[in-house]
Image (cartoon, grey):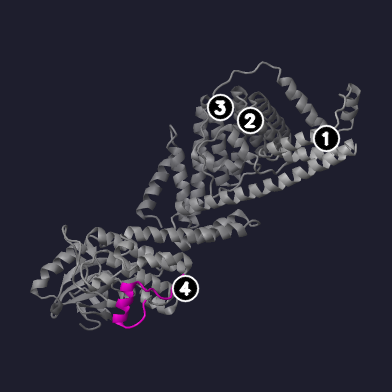
Amino acid sequence: MKINELILGKYRLLEYLNSGSFSSVFRAREEMTNRIVAIKALSKDAYPAERMRYLRSELKAMSNIWGHPNIVSIHTVEPGQDNYLAWIVMEYIEGDNLHQLVQQDDLTLNDVLNIGIDICNGLKAAHAHHILHRDIKPQNILLNSKKEAKIADFSIARIFSESTEFAVTMTGTRKYMAPEQNYGAYDYRADLYATGLVLYEAITKYFPFSGEADEIDRKKAAGEIENLDRCPEEFRNFSMKALHRDVEKRYQTAAEMYDELDRIRRWQYEQQASALIAESANSPATELASALERCRKTFRLQFDIAEQINQSLFFEMRSKAEKENRERLKIRLIQHYTEAIEHTRNGDLDETLRELHKAHNYYFQDAELVQQADMLFKEMCLVVPHSKLPTVQEIVDLIERLSGTDKTLLLEELTTATEQFEPEEHFIPEEHYDQKVSPENLEITPILQSQVQQANNYRILLEEASPEFLLDKVHEDIQYPHEEEAAYIYQQAQIFTQQEDMRRCRSQYKRLGAFYRRHAKKFVRTKDVELVANCYTRARFAYAAANNSRTARKNARNGALYYMHLARQLELQRAWEDAGKSYILAADNYRFAQLIMEVDKCESSATVCYFNAAESAHLKGDLQTAYDYYMRILSIGSELQNPPRVVIETQKLVNEIQRGDVG
């Protein structure tokens, strides 16, 4: 065969690539389609008549794994001519093989992990169809431009029958053979041993056994692995197991080896993601999200797996910060009580009260400090002299010395105390509220804070969203002075909950609801629509936690009206995503208020906003973001009684994207 020769009238040979004992390989062009292919020409001398039956069996078996992403695909097998029995037309991989990349020193540990996972993925498919490759070596691992690995050259593969799963013929590249191949009776695990050799060499740039062929065979059989100190620690145990001299102590299946490499890959990602999160304390959330996404793509992790790891890291970081903060608070609490005791002994009542006030503030910052504070207070009571009760005039004089804020707090306390004598409302179990928090609501929970925020890829996954839980979430981020006062009331409710004093707990929740309702009316006067909507919604949460469902529904209706007003303002600004979220929040409030028709209207408007956001992303070429919006639309539309036209159009677009018709 000559370069530029036309075969069968449709394949033109462009370049000779390599040859072996059974075949020669060429790069060629398919004239009709202009597609570049690789053609393996099988020599007639290598396949005498008695071997033809085996060749046909092997090709038939190989057809079961053609098209696998980690195995070089075979397009067709053409009859040969002259000295060639057949031409196998295969996909042409534009890239180097693993041997060349190792020589170029162009591989990172992440690259090797991904290559190993690809090899195991291909071997899983081959072994599942009873195919033993028998010649896994760096030259037979081809890599495309994305360093995705494909297994090539199944020319000496062994096809096992249903009753036989052992090969006895010594064949393959001796350097990469498993020890048992020298003695016969080997199976699929020989491919796994060779994979271990290939990966070890790719990582360390050294072969694990030095010497001539016989010396290498002896060291393999003895398990004398060399250069282990050059192997990264996280990869060392993998190599020792993969190259163990005892076949029963190695990885027994390609799936088992795949799982171990995947575990190492996830661990590596977790280390890098943890460092990124730790370094991003003062960086915008969007920068961290972009950095984590780049890291995920480097490790080729699926989005949901990376998301799960990220969420665990965020939780650990937050738990650690909370623990450190709690320890600092404990130290300060003890310091203030100690100072208070000292001032009491010196008869300085003003300083004593000042220190107790400071300690009181720390006491309410963390419910776990209650027990510590109680113990310290009891200790203080042992040294505080008992005094007579103050007179009414003394109390009046004390009130006169209070600041305006303290007087307001005192008035709220007295109002709450008065409400405690009112007849208690009928208790309605929480499950009867008809409150529904959909996945969409969970995604936009941050909007319940003081500003509409951009959706975050790393969402907190909630199992249930009770009013108490929602109150806890909205009080995590304090941005306005009124939120500090609200957080103080909420903390008191939490303390009464821990003390199992539910009457006083519900009283605090009522007080919190009234507080937010007053501020909602205040923000109406300042025309701050977003804060009005937020305050009415928080009032709904508080009244629901207090088992006052009627008042909760009333505040929910008010919150819904203002969220709709906010959504329309955002639509005029073409802020489609934020407008959609505001409509969803309005729908959630209407759902709580049991106004189902209004729920449908808001959710229908949300789908239109998200459709506009998706189109904007699509025009920018951001297909993934557009697809996410489309899936969100379908999720909302599936619950609508009369879905708008955009839901139907979205379903068509999603079908096109999934078929690959949309670029």
Q: Identify which residue, 629 or 569, lies in the foreground.
A: 629
Q: Is residue 179 magenta?
A: no
Q: Nearer the viewer, mark 3 or mark 4?
A: 4
Residue type pointed to by label 2? Thr
Determine whether label 2 and label 1 are within 8 Å by CB. Answer: no
Judge depth for marks 1 and 4 and give the one in front: 1
Q: Please state which of the two labelled residues, at mark 2 or mark 1, is closer to the viewer.
A: 1
- The picture places residue 244, in percent across and down from the top left corner, at 34, 67
* Quadrant housing residue 562: top right
As drawn, the label of residue 497 is 2
The percent coordinates of residue 276 (x first, y second) are 57, 60
Side of 267 relative to 537 (left or right): left
Vertical arrangement, residue 293 with respect to residue 637, above or below: below
Residue with the mark numbered 3: 593
- List the residue tagged with mark 4: 229
Residues rendered magenta in the picture: 209-231
* Crowding at mark 2 (Cα within 10 Å: few <14, some 14-19, many 20+): some
Q: Secondary structure at mark 4?
A: helix
Q: Which residue is mark 1?
A: 383
Q: In the structure shown, which secondary structural element does the residue marked by tag 2 occupy?
A: helix
**View extreme (left): residue:** 49
Task: Evaluate if marks 4 and 2 touch, with contact meaning CB atoms under 8 Å apart.
Answer: no
Q: Does the image show residue 457?
A: no
Instruction: Reply above or below: 593 against 216.
Output: above
Q: Seen from this angle, which residue lies furthest top?
A: 423
Going from N to C along the chain, the mark reached first, 3 or 4, is: 4
Q: Label 2 to label 1, Cα distance in Å? A: 30 Å
Separation of marks 1 and 4 at Cα, in angstroms: 65 Å
The residue at 46%/58% (across/down) is 266
